[in-house]
Amino acid sequence: MIGIALFLFGWTLLSQYRPSLPNPWVTFLSAVDLFAHPFYVESANDQGIGWNILSSLGRVGTGFGLAALIGIPLGFIIGRVKFMQAMLSPIISILRPVSPLAWLPIGMVVFQAANPASIWVIFISSIWPIILNTSAGVSQVPQDYLNVARVLRLSEWKVFTKILLPASLPYLLTGIRLSVGVAWLVIVAAEMVSGGKGIGFWVWDEYQNSQYAHIIVGIFVVGVLGLIIEQLLILITKLISRGETTS
């Protein structure tokens, strides 16, 4: 509470020196007004904040889902097969540090549309934490476990379900959490550049209209949604980890 009070005090103080910056009370009234009618539709580029939030959530879900669908199996393969690790590690090391927005022009060229290009940016930005954490988890599996599996002549599927997956699950879940965080950070910047509909585009559009209080509301919306998603993932991680411990 003390931190929040100091934050609001600093915000109010700053707004006194910069009158164009809305103070907390004005921002709160703007938020009340915005969320009174979150799903209105005036035109293609003038829609309520609710539609823009849903649009961004849809893009994040699609891009992250594709990243998980490809990244998790690829991470297991890289961690399990030394040849694949040696072959793909240099490529990942080169591509992973690339700025997410640098991928947007490639997406626009390939897909010729803003929406799939934004999903592409989320996909390519969020797949690396999944691959790297999953492969690291698989690589950490004690060799003794694998030797026992070899002596017992377990099939590769049994090795995967009974040894690799349980042992690497904490790493995998950490990678998923990092990946979702990256996806949510990237979507705002991608939508600002690509346009269309979404919370990033909405914030940029409000800036063009000099609706600065709406921009601050959008920032808080992004933060709150990111916090909710993170807490949901922490809850899911605890439930899965408890299930593994119980079994």
Image (spheres, rainbow, N blue to C red):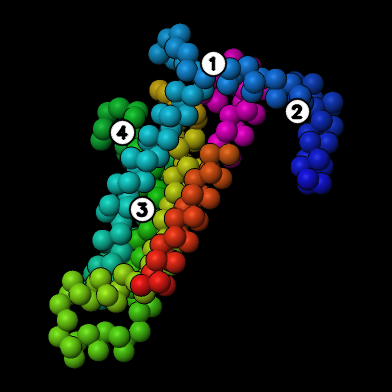
Q: Nearer the viewer, mark 1 or mark 4?
A: 1
- Residue under label 1, please give it: 37
Q: Is residue 24 above or below residue 230?
A: above
Q: Is residue 127 left or right of residue 242?
A: left
* Residue 24: assigned label: 2
What whole-number distance in Å separates the C-alpha atoms at marks 2 and 3? Answer: 37 Å
- Residue under label 4, please give it: 116
Image position, residue 45 (x, y; %) = 44, 15
Pick whichever, 88 or 201, lies toward us: 201
Residue sitting at 47 percent across and 29 percent down? 53
Image position, residue 42 (x, y; %) = 45, 8
* Residue 127: assigned label: 3
Q: Is residue 135 above or below residue 106?
A: below
What whole-number distance in Å separates the C-alpha atoms at marks 3 and 4? Answer: 16 Å
Residue that protrudes farthest toward the front in the picture? 246
Contact between marks 3 and 4 (CB within 8 A): the answer is: no
Give the mark, 2 or 1, whose residue is nearer the N terminus. Answer: 2
Give the mark, 1 or 4, whose residue is nearer the N terminus. Answer: 1
Amino acid found under the numbered disc labelled 4: Pro
Give the mark, 2 or 3, whose residue is nearer the N terminus. Answer: 2
| Numbered range of the magenta stretch | 201-223
Residue that protrudes farthest toward the top in the picture? 42
Choose top left, top right, bottom left or bottom right for residue 95.
bottom left
Amino acid found under the numbered disc labelled 3: Ile
Image position, residue 238 (x, y; %) = 48, 61
